[in-house]
Image: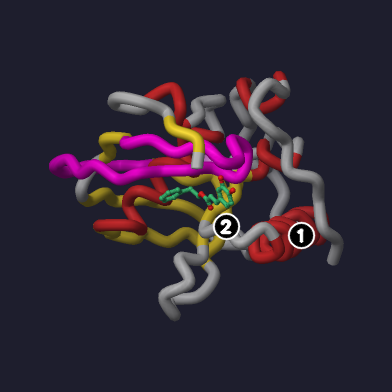
């Protein structure tokens, strides 16, 4: 396991579209392990592979509410419902916050690290986090979507 460097806003890699994972192998497991370690060290609740310079469709989430770590490989948001506003931040936009509209609930279909498919219905903060992390895979940052002022903490 190793800590990876989190890229910050301004780095071109954060604006690229990531490619699907093709092999559910030891390299993927290393990436997922490193991403979790890097997220925990930075005290984040979500981290996407492009934030550590890897342009693959992978993210990890741990809301810190006891539900534990969840890993998403090649995720697809297949349904959304409603709207919520949350004051978001991002490990790649350190110190900045702003209100973003996201679906209130969503269905995400993805694969785990072993290539087993799963489907998850999420709401509230988990829906915010999945939507936010999924955006990273398409080169979108929360600051692109802020409703109102982007504010410095
Ligand atoms: C994405 O964001 C997110 O600026 C994950 O100084 C955000 O983990 C999902 C962080 C809001 C749901 C709601 C940001 C840590 C962490 C900072 C993060 C900072 C230290 C952001
Ligand atoms: Co982010």
- Left or right of 96, for residue 131: left
Q: Which residues are magenta?
A: 77-99
x 72%, y 23%: residue = 11
User: Is the distance from the Cβ of mark 1 to the nearest ligand 1 atom less than 8 Å?
Assistant: no
The answer for how far apart the CA atoms under marks 2 and 1 are is 14 Å
- Left or right of 121, for residue 3: right
Q: Nearer the viewer, residue 27 or 148?
A: 148
Q: Nearer the viewer, residue 78 or 132?
A: 132
Q: State the residue lying farthest toward the front.
A: 153
| Residue named by callout 2 | 44
Main SS type for the magenta part?
A: strand
The circle drawn on residue 34 is 1
Q: How was this image coloured?
A: secondary structure
- Position of 33 relative to 16 (above/below): below
- Position of 46 relative to 63 (above/below): above
User: Is the distance from the Cβ of mark 2 to the nearest ligand 1 atom less than 8 Å?
Assistant: yes
Locate the N terminus and report the quarter of the image it occupies: bottom right
């Amino acid at each position: 396991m190793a800590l990876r460097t989190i890229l910050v806003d301004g780095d071109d890699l954060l604006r690229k579209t990531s490619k699907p994972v093709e092999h559910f192998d030891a390299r993927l497991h290393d990436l997922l392990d490193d991403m979790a370690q890097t997220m925990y060290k930075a005290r984040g609740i979500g981290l996407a592979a492009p934030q550590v310079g890897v342009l693959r469709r992978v993210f990890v989430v741990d809301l810190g509410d006891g539900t534990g770590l969840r890993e998403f490989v090649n995720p697809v948001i297949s349904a959304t419902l409603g709207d919520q506003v949350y004051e978001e931040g991002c490990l790649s936009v350190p110190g900045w916050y702003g209100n973003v509209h996201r679906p209130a609930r969503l269905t995400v279909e993805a694969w785990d690290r072993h290539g087993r498919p799963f489907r998850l219905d999420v709401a509230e903060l988990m829906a915010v986090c999945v939507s936010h992390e999924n955006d990273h895979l398409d080169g979108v940052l929360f600051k692109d979507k802020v409703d109102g002022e982007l504010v410095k903490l």
